[in-house]
Image (cartoon, rainbow, N blue to C red):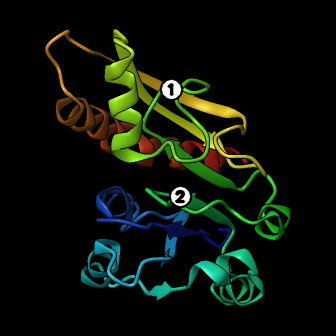
Amino acid sequence: MTDPKNIAILASGSGSNAEKIIHYFKNHKAINIACVITNNENAGAIERAEKAHVPSKYFSKEDFEHPSFLLQYLKSKEVDYIVLAGFLLKIAPDIVAQYPDKIINIHPALLPKYGGKGMYGNHVHESVILNKETESGITIHIVNENYDEGRIIFQAKCDISPQMGAKQLSAKVQQLEHQHFPKIIEEFVENN
């Protein structure tokens, strides 16, 4: 049997997606969550990782812009894939070059709409509501050098009712994230 593939999860916030991913792969034979990395010393993702006995590490914004230490850390953890789960910084070209087609992101809208710099979290949901869209959803895609422009590997949609606000839409989209993200990661890693 081959060694399991190691995944590093990058998260900036509460870590609800990171937690779902960690639990999904807890006893997986082919995939292991090697670490959770954050750019936010107060991220809830750190506590969630610790509760699940997954190593977590903080790197500053500067560390992500000049990622030699980060890349060394990923190498020390024998990381094969990187998963962005609510990670808000742009991934440096050096990291993309070291992990070509091995970095996966989830975006809380149906790309190519509502993507790009500054389009994250409630900013996305508020824009979707403001533009009176009738549907939104999630996009899981490969990360390249540009925000939200990598190859799309999966999308799931949800309807938006006229009276729905950004908060309700956010809850609906998060349900889709939790439902689909771990499974799509599994399929992607097992097939690449």
Mark number displayed over residue 110: none
Judging from the image, what secondary structure is the residue with disc 2 in?
Answer: strand
Q: Which residue is mark 1?
A: 155
**What residue appears at the point 36 percent right and 14 percent down from the top-left corner?**
135
Three-letter code for the amino acid on which mark 2 is drawn = Leu
* Left or right of residue 143, residue 175 in this image: left
Q: Earlier in the sequence, mark 1 or mark 2?
A: 2
Q: Which residue is mark 2?
A: 84
Q: Determine the CA span between mark 1 and mark 2.
A: 16 Å
The answer to which of 8 and 188 lies nearer the viewer is: 8
Residue lying furthest front: 130
Q: Where is the N terminus found, in terms of image quarters?
A: bottom right
Pinpoint residue 44: horizontal percent, then vertical percent.
28, 73
- Residue 99's image quarter? bottom right
**What residue appears at the point 56 percent right and 23 percent down from the top-left corner?**
113
Judging from the image, what secondary structure is the residue with disc 1 in?
Answer: strand
Residue lying furthest left: 163
The answer to which of 48 and 161 lies nearer the viewer is: 161
Three-letter code for the amino acid on which mark 1 is drawn = Gln
**What residue appears at the point 33 percent right and 42 percent down from the top-left corner?**
122
